[in-house]
């Protein structure tokens, strides 16, 4: 029986079928739904860890004890977890350890488009790359077997287009093998698990030897195969790109690689000998192309296809036509138009507490170092209230550095609650320890909103819906040693403005917790206010808060009641008192 | 089995994703190989949400290709107007006669294209543009949120396939307490293109 599943549903299903008992992750688009789905299967333990490094250590620990484990993250999550990932390749594992990592070509919701296949080579860890949901399911199982056979973690790569596409999956095999009767056992073996230099020196040759064996193994893995076609053109591809190439080159000979690292050299040579021209179709970096070149095989790749952005069948076709690989298809009438089609940029939702905070910060004219989450949208006009954003947890350290660099502007760092618990605590300690004066504002909406309202250590609920101790941010920060800490409702804009001035003038390192639960999450909604068109001067001041239900008409402002959340921020900012709530 | 490609274009919160899930499932029930892709940025609400659905004997790419889409289903007029270059020659557009202003239009900094201009743009390639008062019909049925199923009703007449299959899939995929409402919405949509 077949069922349509997204790639992410299929990864979770494959993990369940493959006997994974411990799953750990920090959310991140496009990977988040994998652990959400996994956590609902019977008999498994799943956790949202505070960050990816923690999730990696948790999964490694479980695998050390012989339990099959999975760790999930988006591509940049592996930067955070890299230190742990690298040691795990050296120590190796006992139970299968699969790391599902999702890249985001075109940066649909990311700060960069790094190609994580490079991590496979960098850390000397095998990597599989499925093309559709059926393969996503199967490859997780294979990765677990491979992991146990070679005693290594195994990376499984996804991309946005795989994670968020739905394709049929065979669900006939519905139940996993029952777990073994034996109790998990951590076999003490310090020479293997304690990576002091003397031990690590013994492990490195094992890693190199393992990689050679894996490359040999790759020659006979059924997921690396040649698809016969004509002798002119040979296409090397993997992942979703393979399917784009199948659309464009239906008659070519194909080398489909299910394992993208290490590569099966003999198979590649056999393939190359069958065709006149070898072309690698791969998004982002010339990862396969460079390895083929090193084997001395003549290939085309990045001279035809772009290095930047996401591929699509349209793009592969147009590049192939331009390079003379195929003939141009008969084109329908050309679309020529000057018609203005204004875009719809992502915006803070009506009623969002972040907006009220940014309104106050904008009025204060401070320099704002930002972080990653819904609140990053505060950078965009008309709010324009964020001046830096790099990666998760960067805001506080950057603010401190700007301050120590001698800039005289008043600087505040703005960071979300989930992001603070992910990587904001250490930089906050730094501000205190190194006698900074930065004011940090935690914009606390009690959710990981950006990625789909996942729970986090501050919410008091686990991914498996259990009630647990909620980290008390205020106590935590006071516990670190901060003396100046205030909690203010983000919607109380007068109090917020006052508190901000008080903190800035204090000359002390300080923290404001700006708290307002996410209205999309709580679904709180009030009656929309009304505009008194007699009083409204159409001055546009309310429009500067960038709230989408506010519409400028010919001679007054109107509120779109379908969209309005009734939060009343516009009521507070209107100098004419022309916007009235009941 | 005839290859059929659909591109559904709407605005966050309009129910584009549920409608495209239903459409994909209908294809599977009709015996096609099916793939579906969701293309959307970081907006929870108010941003563009597009779905590609493909039915065929054997479907490779989950993304549709330019110049080859059979049906463009616009949940909102301007959204339909973004994709004429995806349509094949003599394709069909089914468009909800409904406008949601982008922020720049609300701020008076950009203008919303006229319905006539959108229609003639689509007609560069489309054989026909069906305007459906989907949001209005859904509102009259009691819930503007079922606009997606009204549009599916209108689409189902043009695409074909056993009506019972469509009804069965809708019955399975919408929340239990809204099944009747959705079946009514489907019927109302079908009438428009009957
Ligand atoms: C290393 C890393 N992991 C995960 C993400 C994905 N991500 C972006 S923002 C965010 C969390 C945002 O939550 P919060 O800080 O509470 O802000 P909110 O969106 O709720 O306003 C996550 C998980 C990322 N960008 N980088």
Image: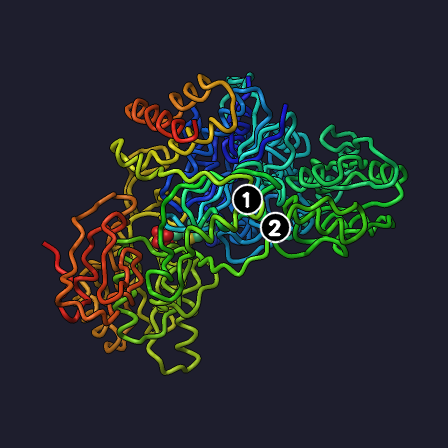
Above or below for A472 versus B152: below
Question: Could you tell whether A92 is left or right of A4 in the image?
Answer: right
Q: Nearer the viewer, mark 2 or mark 1?
A: 2
Q: Quick one: A42 or B41, which is closer to the camera?
A: B41
Q: Residue A365: which disc? A: none
Q: Is residue A337 above or below residue A53?
A: below
Q: Is residue A472 left or right of residue B98?
A: left
Coloring scheme of the render?
rainbow
Residue A386 x %, y %:
38, 67
Q: Which labelled disc corresponds to residue A160?
A: 1
Left or right: residue A507 versus residue A327 is left
Give residue A578's quadrant in the image.
bottom left
The residue at which mark 2 appears reads as A310
Give the Cα distance between marks 2 and 1.
9 Å
Badge 2: residue crowd in 10 Å (few <14, some 14–19, many ≥20) = many
- Residue A239 position within the rendered picture, expressed as x and y whole percent measured from the top left: 65, 39
Split into 4 quadrants, where in the image is the N terminus of chain A?
top right
Which structural element holds mark 1?
Answer: helix
Res B145 seen here: yes
State the quadrant of the C terminus of chain A. bottom left
Task: Check if mark 2's residue and mark 1's residue have beta carbons within 8 Å.
Answer: yes
The correct choice, above or below, for A62 with respect to A502 in the image is above
Q: Residue at x 34, y 67 (%)?
A: A382
Q: What chain letter is assigned to the residue under label 2?
A: A
User: Residue at 55% across / 28% down in the picture?
Assistant: A14
């Amino acid at each position: 029986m077949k069922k349509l599943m997204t790639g992410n549903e299929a990864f979770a299903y494959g993990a369940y079928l493959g006997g994974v008992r411990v799953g750990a992750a920090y959310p991140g688009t496009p990977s988040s739904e994998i652990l959400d789905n996994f956590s609902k299967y019977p008999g498994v333990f799943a956790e949202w860890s505070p960050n990816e490094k923690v999730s990696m250590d948790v999964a490694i620990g479980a695998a050390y004890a012989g339990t099959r484990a999975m760790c999930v993250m988006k591509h940049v999550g592996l930067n955070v977890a890299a230190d742990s990932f690298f040691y795990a390749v050296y120590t190796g594992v006992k139970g299968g350890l699969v790391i599902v990592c999702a890249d985001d070509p075109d940066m649909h919701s990311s700060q960069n488009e790094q190609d994580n296949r490079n991590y496979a080579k960098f850390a000397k860890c095998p990597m599989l790359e499925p093309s559709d949901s059926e393969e996503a399911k199967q490859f997780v199982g294979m990765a677990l077997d491979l992991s146990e056979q070679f005693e290594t973690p195994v990376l499984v790569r996804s991309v946005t287009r795989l994670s968020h596409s739905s394709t049929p999956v065979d669900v006939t095999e519905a139940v996993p093998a029952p777990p073994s009767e034996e109790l998990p056992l951590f076999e003490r073996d310090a020479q293997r698990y304690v990576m002091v230099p003397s031990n690590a020196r013994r492990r490195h040759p094992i890693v190199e030897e393992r990689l050679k064996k894996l490359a040999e193994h790759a020659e006979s893995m059924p997921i690396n195969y040649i698809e016969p076609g004509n002798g002119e053109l040979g296409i090397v591809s993997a992942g979703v790109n393979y399917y784009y190439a199948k659309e464009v080159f239906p008659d070519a000979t194909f080398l489909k690689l299910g394992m993208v690292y290490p590569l099966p050299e003999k198979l590649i040579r056999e393939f190359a000998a069958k065709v006149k021209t070898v072309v690698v179709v791969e998004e982002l970096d010339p990862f396969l192309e460079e390895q083929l070149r090193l084997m001395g095989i003549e290939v085309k790749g990045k001279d035809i296809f772009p290095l930047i952005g996401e591929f699509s069948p349209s793009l592969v076709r147009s590049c192939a036509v331009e390079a003379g690989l195929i003939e141009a298809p008969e084109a329908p009438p050309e679309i020529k138009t000057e018609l203005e089609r204004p875009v719809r940029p992502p915006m803070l939702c009506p009623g969002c507490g972040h907006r009220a905070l940014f309104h106050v910060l904008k009025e204060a004219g401070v320099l704002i170092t930002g972080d990653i989450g819904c609140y990053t949208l505060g950078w965009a006009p008309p709010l324009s209230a964020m001046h830096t954003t790099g990666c998760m947890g960067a805001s506080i350290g950057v603010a401190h550095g700007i301050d120590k660099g001698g800039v005289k502007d008043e600087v505040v760092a703005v960071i979300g609650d989930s992001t603070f618990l992910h990587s904001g605590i250490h930089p906050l300690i730094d501000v205190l320890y190194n006698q900074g004066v930065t004011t940090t504002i935690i914009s606390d909406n009690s959710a990981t909103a950006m990625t789909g309202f996942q729970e986090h250590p501050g919410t008091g609920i686990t991914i498996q819906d259990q009630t647990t101790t909620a980290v008390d941010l205020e106590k935590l920060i006071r516990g670190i040693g901060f003396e100046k800490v205030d909690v203010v409702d983000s919607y109380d804009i007068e109090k917020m403005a006052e508190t901000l001035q008080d903190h800035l003038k204090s000359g002390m390192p300080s923290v404001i917790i700006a708290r307002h639960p996410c209205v999309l999450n709580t679904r709180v909604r009030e009656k929309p206010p009304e505009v008194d068109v007699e009083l409204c001067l159409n001055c546009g001041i309310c429009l500067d808060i960038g709230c989408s239900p506010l519409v400028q008409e010919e001679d007054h402002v109107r509120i779109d009641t379908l969209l309005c959340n009734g939060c009343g921020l516009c009521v507070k900012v209107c100098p004419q008192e022309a916007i009235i709530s009941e | 089995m005839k290859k059929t490609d659909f591109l559904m274009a709407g605005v966050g919160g309009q129910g584009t994703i549920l409608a495209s899930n239903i459409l994909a499932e209908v294809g599977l029930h009709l015996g096609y190989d099916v793939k579906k892709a969701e293309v959307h940025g970081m907006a929870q609400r108010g941003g563009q949400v597009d779905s590609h659905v493909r039915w065929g004997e054997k479907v490779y790419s989950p993304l549709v290709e330019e110049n080859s889409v059979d049906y463009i289903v616009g949940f909102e007029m301007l959204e339909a107007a973004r994709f004429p270059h995806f349509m094949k020659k003599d394709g069909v557009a089914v468009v909800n006669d409904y406008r949601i202003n982008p922020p720049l239009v609300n701020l008076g900094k950009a203008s919303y294209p006229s319905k006539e201009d959108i229609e003639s743009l689509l007609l560069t390639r489309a054989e026909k543009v069906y305007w459906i008062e989907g949001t209005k019909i859904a509102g009259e049925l009691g819930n503007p949120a079922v606009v997606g199923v009204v549009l599916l009703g209108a689409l189902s007449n043009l695409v074909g396939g056993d009506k019972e299959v469509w009804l069965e899939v809708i019955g399975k995929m919408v929340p239990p307490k809204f099944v009747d409402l959705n079946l009514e919405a489907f019927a109302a949509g079908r009438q428009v293109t009957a």
